[in-house]
Image (cartoon, helix red, strand yellow):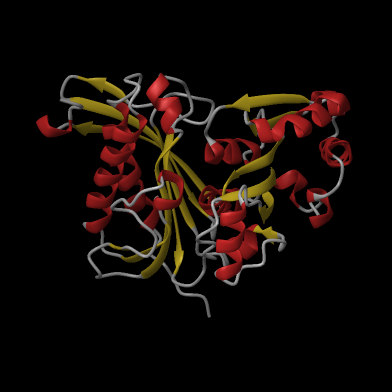
Amino acid sequence: MEPVLPADLGLDLVRATEAAAIIAGRWMGLGQPEQANEAAAQAMAETLNALPIDGRIVIGEEGKLGQHSVLDSGVQVGNGNGPALDIVLDPVDGSRLLAMGHSDAISVIGAAPRGAMRSLFPAIYMEKIIVDRQTAASLVPECLDAPAAWTLGMVARVKGKTVRDLIVFMLDRPRHAHLIEEIRTAGARVALRQEGDIAGALAAAAHGEVDLLMGIGGAAEGVIAACGVKSLGGGMLARLAPQSESERQAILAAGIDPLQVYSCDDLVQGEAIFFAATGITSGSLLVGVRYKGGEAETESLVLRRETGTRRVIRAYHSIRTEDRGPK
């Protein structure tokens, strides 16, 4: 029997994303992504450790950052007096976007009962296709190897659109040059972003302007995204995509099959799943943090898979002197 989690767990978790976002937002446009991420991670860790949970970070920050942080894989969070949880998180999804003052930087966290999430450590990169609930049932593993035009044609048919109506979210990377050309040749439009893999996944799953996400992004971000996509009822296919021989060898040494295709259910099992995100800079998903003297205003999204509940929370926070930004 699946463990029962507190119905208000999402409201506890959003405190951690709010804390990270409030700190991170002060670094917007300062050109210092590492410092912003470090400050946000510290704020998120402090908030999580005050919560009544017994959490374990399944995939941490070290793979993305290339260095250790307070939110590494395997770190215990919470005060220990609560449900045993698997935790995945990203204090700043889009740290370079934040540093440049661009839109769509968010802070995110996902949680599920202990043992529900698949750890893909030490994998760094993952190939993904993500769609909304309307298309989820039609997403089959063959889509990962099929020509882009075939997948786009399937999505268009299900949605009652033409291929030229579709918008595909993708990270702007040299490795995607051929895929971008395929999509454009098929007639679909491409929304390229420098960062924001998780925000893109949510946009694709939310039955909004973006129709699907395609391409290679972070593996940790993939597990985090799976929590949100599954909570929204969307569909996801994923497969590890090592970008170096050393990464491939590390994956094999960990006993992970690099060719296995994963769905949302493979990455995070069961129905007791919570997901929270807070906007840092304003974008298509959430409004960013707004500062007014000793007060900060935040907008957050809280999802609960079990009930299908989707909450958008606008909150006002008093800011302590030490939380008012870089010195």
The answer to which of 174 and 307 lies nearer the viewer is 174
Residue lying farthest to the bottom in this orientation: 1
Left or right, 226 with respect to 294, comes to right
Residue 287 in view: no
Could you tell me which residue is drawn at 67 percent across and 47 percent down? 128
Quadrant of the snapshot with the C terminus: top left
Q: x and y percent of residue 304 in the render?
A: 49, 54
The answer to which of 287 and 8 lies nearer the viewer is 287
Could you tell me which residue is drawn at 49 percent across and 25 percent down? 283
Residue 323 in view: yes
Residue lying farthest to the front in this orientation: 245
110 to 260, vertically: above or below = above
- Circle count: 0
Left or right, 146 with respect to 36, comes to right
The answer to which of 113 and 40 lies nearer the viewer is 40
Left or right, 174 with respect to 100, comes to right
Could you tell me which residue is drawn at 52 percent across and 31 percent down? 285
Q: x and y percent of residue 81 in the render?
A: 24, 70
Question: Which corner quadrant of the image does residue 266 belong to?
Answer: bottom right
Q: x and y percent of residue 43 in the render?
A: 25, 44
Q: x and y percent of residue 50 in the render?
A: 21, 57
